[in-house]
Amino acid sequence: MQHYPAAWGHYDVCKSQIYTEEGLAWDYMACQPEATDMTKYLRVALDPPNITCGDPPETYCALENPYMCNNECDATTEELAHPPELMFDFEGRNPTTFWQSTSWKKYPKPLQVNITLSWNKTIELTDDIVLTFESGRPEQMVLEKSLDYGRTWTPYQFYATDCLDAFTMEPKTVNELTQRTLLDIICTEDYSRGYVWKNDKTVRFEIKDRFALFAGPRLHNMASLYGQLDTTKNLRDFFTITDLRIRLLKPATGATMVDENNLSRYFYAISDIKVQGRCKCNLHANSCVFDKGKLGCECEHNTTGPDCGRCKRHYHGRAWSVGSYLPIPKGTANICNEFSPTFMHILEISLLHVGDTMMVPRLDSGPRVCDNAMLRCQNGGTCHHHQRCHCSPGFTGVLCERVRCQGPGECDDQSSGQASLHHHPIGPQRVLPLLVFPLVIVSLC
């Protein structure tokens, strides 16, 4: 398992007991499960389903030497079979175990395979996706992701020996990306070279290099990355999946022309797939269990659901909200509060709008502008003594709800909805009252 810097461990405790003037109380914190090898929990499907070699038995030749034809695949013999599950077994055996496709016997009809990895659960990627090929690396390939359990797909990255010819895209590497172009879909030629590079058999989708655009080359500034994940839904969604699909479009040929007299040289073979990640629990759980073939978060903070995506029954005293990574190191739990029978009646009375002024209830004798449980400072702001929000750079307002104008035309862009990657909020954030009177008037203009 890849070990990250210590900053990654700040979100492993959901709550702890503390002493207050009233006695013991719970201190709630944002939390998330530890990253692990997610290939232990997936289902794999191949399309076409009969693309695996061995039925009927077949002999294969080496790509580098067309006269070396001594590799046999036979589905009825365990030692000679290459089923899909061998892409995910322990790599350390000798000889190496691997999945293998049928050969390109139907050339010039394309030899194409879809390998779909499904978790039936939303997961967040934490390290590079790595495919290790036993054959030559494909000359054309696409990695795709789904966020809706395989109903729709979007490309993650294109791979080709010639990106312009294969996908009409200029070749690019992840090192050419910036913070503002991190979400761009690129085509790379780095992982599709022929057998000249046979000592390097891996194809990668570089997660950590993208993290480094915010956290620094050695991921030393995780607070910066977490701040971006906290305030930019598109960025968080980019590293979130329910399914992955590997589309193998053209096998390695090692030459400009295909040798039609020896098509047994051309096929796909994968010995290992690595997918490192964690269950997505919306920062409301620190553990995820695999029960009856299904992953599920063990939810805290009075939340429930596979992703802790809603409040428990009788805990709708405030609208459900994802937890916050900020402030470092504990984050903000945004727990679901117990529902009060008089909640709706008080809500109708307390949410009085007069022009651009909102009436916000007071909890005690002093004004209570913000509260981490109910009136959350937005866009990464932190609540200071319930008197004011300390806003992150670039934001202002009573609850840090507005982008600070920093140059000519910037405010106009924000008001028209054209926010940059840095200032795209997670979504509409509702300001709810603390349900104790009397009221104090706070101007939001």
Image (tube, rainbow, N blue to C red):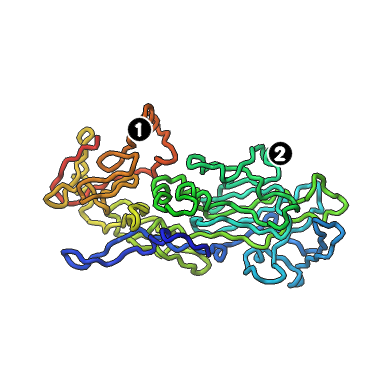
Q: Which residue is mark 2?
A: 165
The quarter of the rendered structure image containing the C terminus is top left
Secondary structure state at the residue bearing disc 2: helix
Residue 311 in sight: no
Q: Which residue is mark 1?
A: 406
- The residue that appears at 34% across and 44% down in the rendered structure is 379
* Labels 1 and 2: the sequence-earlier one: 2
Q: Quadrant of residue 243?
A: bottom right
In three-dimensional space, the C-alpha distance between marks 1 and 2, rounded to whole angstroms, equals 43 Å
Q: Position of residue 269 (x, y in %)?
A: 71, 59
Q: Amino acid type of disc 1?
A: Gln
Q: Nearer the viewer, mark 1 or mark 2?
A: 1
Q: Relative to the observer, which residue lies in front, 57 or 292? A: 57
Q: Position of residue 313 (x, y in %)?
A: 32, 60
Q: Quadrant of residue 310?
A: bottom left
- The residue that appears at 48% across and 47% down in the rendered structure is 213
Instruction: Tell me the number on the disc at residue 190.
Output: none
Rendered view: 428 above or below 78: above
